[in-house]
């Protein structure tokens, strides 16, 4: 077993488990969390991958979203990776800013020194984790993907580029157009260099406008979000969805902000959306 | 208005609000959180007081328990006080231990110097907060009380001693018999002095054995709790309930630990229990 169990806690008759492992792709030791619903005691279950936002680890969604209740009902696992490579040898933002480096991997494969050595979060999420988890845990290869803010960006980009590997995509408060917002420009410049043609593969609004989506998409955006619209650029995703006739429902929710109180309020609807596309009968 | 609003976040179509105020009873500035369900926009609603455990503030339950969903459905407010007086002038544990002083008020009225000046948490919860909140917020005088660990102790003691002020009592992993467990002996000695006869009024097992309960009680205790049974002494509450023929359901839950994953798993049942006794029709 290449997974080390760090902790396990009973939750809604299932198992909230934290693992560590040596990531080959990221070239460092990583931690992540998984919720295994009670159904996983006697059968394999599909998994929703949840990608968290800036400054988060695997613990924020685990503790604050209240997702385990519905996941336990539906028979859906939750896979909650960390948001960047970790460890003393991993290059951070030069001045330790919250929006680049540790806790801010942006789900890309970095090409620029010194970040390329560890910051390969795209391949970690798309390739390494599913292979590892489907070998070591009672998971089927049926996957859905969701996330928040930077992780909403990650979920949209990864889902749009890998429609054969996921059944459905959702996002809360995603960074829709990182090529043209402050967070995104900083991150993509740092990880990928100044050539903007290399940024397009990591820009959900550009990808959706160019190719549409084979997968159903659900997005929720709070209208009292302190980062809306400047950092999130939701209007670009709305325009791309309309232009490409994508099967996307993008909802603007009055009064809600960027916090986990917003996520908690709508996570049940996202889980039931994914469950329908994963073929879970209880949905 | 003697309440200052520190923050407000929309949550399940209701309002998660944090307030500060100058407590007369505690002689310091305090913060607390309130969840107001959507029904409170146009009518007064009953309130469940939640007392948190050692090291907590008003934020732990707010962020981690997932209680707002059911509270919003039922039309029940959640009142979430801090766990001790706060501020630079408030005496702490001499060596800063987590289980005494700041974050560890134990819901008693201290009589010993230097704690008596601020540590009057019993009166703060029973008297000051309800008067203040029912004047300033759309709350009825219908109250229920619950809590976790040290807060489970507080809820049981306060509910048992004030059956005219609450409709129902519940607790997760309560410290049932503080007169005879390490946490309790340290706290009661420090706040009340060495005379154990003064401790009895703050010992749920002793109170229940002596007087029974006019109020219905629901308790959940995880059997994988790292503090069970040494600190929690659940067996003393079970014996007292049986001896006094109290209307108490005390459930031992296999596999669950002392964490908020345990609370989240059963909080819906506690809210529906309180809602029935508060006369909320949707329960």
Image (spheres, coloured by chain):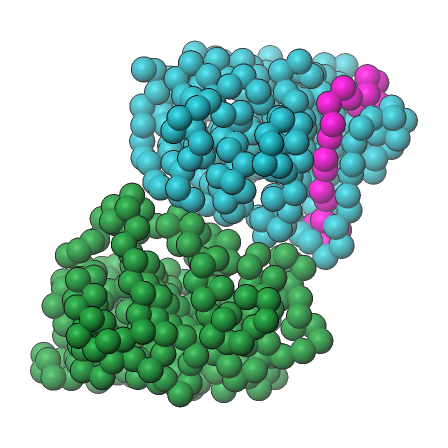
Chain colours: A green, B cyan
Magenta-colored span: B208-226
Q: Is residue B158 visible in this depiction of the protein? A: yes
Residue depicted at x 66% and y 31%: B276
Q: Is residue B225 magenta?
A: yes
**Displayed quadrant of residue B146:** top right
Q: Does the magenta stretch include residue B169?
A: no
Q: Position of residue B93 (x, y in %)?
A: 53, 30
**Displayed quadrant of residue A217:** bottom left
Can you say whether B182 is above or below B105 in the image?
A: below
Which residue is at the front of the view, A177 or A96? A177
Residue depicted at x 40% and y 88%: A164
Q: Quadrant of the N terminus of chain B?
A: top left
Left or right: A283 in relation to A25: right
Can you say whether A229 is above or below B90 in the image?
A: below
Q: Is residue A54 visible in this depiction of the protein? A: no
Q: Where is residue A50 in the image (x, y as percent from the top left)?
A: 42, 68
Q: Position of residue A128 (x, y in %)?
A: 44, 85
Count of all numbered marks drawn on residues in the image: 0
Can you say whether A66 is above or below A163 in the image?
A: above
Q: In which quarter of the image is the C terminus of chain B?
A: top right
Left or right: A248 in relation to A136: left
**Displayed quadrant of residue A152:** bottom left
Left or right: B209 in relation to A249: right
Residue depicted at x 56% and y 73%: A280
For this orientation, the residue located farthest to the right is: B243
């Amino acid at each position: 077993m290449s997974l080390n169990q760090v902790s396990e806690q009973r939750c809604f008759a299932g198992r909230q488990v934290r693992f560590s492992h040596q990531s080959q792709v990221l070239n460092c030791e990583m931690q992540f969390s998984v919720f295994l619903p009670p159904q996983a005691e006697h059968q394999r279950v599909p998994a929703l991958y949840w990608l968290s936002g800036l400054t988060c680890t695997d613990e924020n969604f685990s503790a604050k979203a209240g997702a385990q209740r519905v996941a336990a009902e539906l028979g859906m696992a939750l896979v909650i990776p960390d948001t960047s490579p970790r460890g003393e040898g991993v290059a951070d933002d030069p001045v330790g800013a919250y929006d680049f480096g540790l806790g801010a991997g942006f789900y890309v494969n970095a090409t620029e020194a010194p970040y390329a050595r560890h910051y390969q979060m795209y391949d970690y999420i798309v390739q390494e984790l599913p292979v590892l988890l489907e070998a070591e845990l009672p998971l089927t290869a049926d996957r859905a993907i969701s996330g928040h803010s930077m992780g909403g960006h990650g979920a949209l980009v990864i889902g749009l580029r890998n429609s054969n590997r996921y059944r459905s995509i959702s996002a809360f408060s995603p960074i829709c157009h990182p090529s043209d917002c402050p967070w995104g420009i900083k991150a993509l410049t740092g990880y990928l260099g100044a050539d903007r043609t290399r940024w397009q593969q990591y820009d959900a609004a550009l990808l959706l406008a160019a190719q549409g989506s084979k997968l159903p998409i659900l997005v929720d955006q709070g209208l009292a979000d302190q980062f809306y619209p400047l950092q999130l650029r939701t209007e670009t995703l709305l325009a791309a969805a309309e232009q490409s006739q994508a099967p996307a429902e993008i909802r603007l929710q009055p009064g809600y902000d960027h916090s986990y109180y917003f996520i908690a309020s709508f996570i049940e609807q996202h889980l039931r959306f994914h469950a329908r596309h994963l073929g879970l009968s209880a949905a």
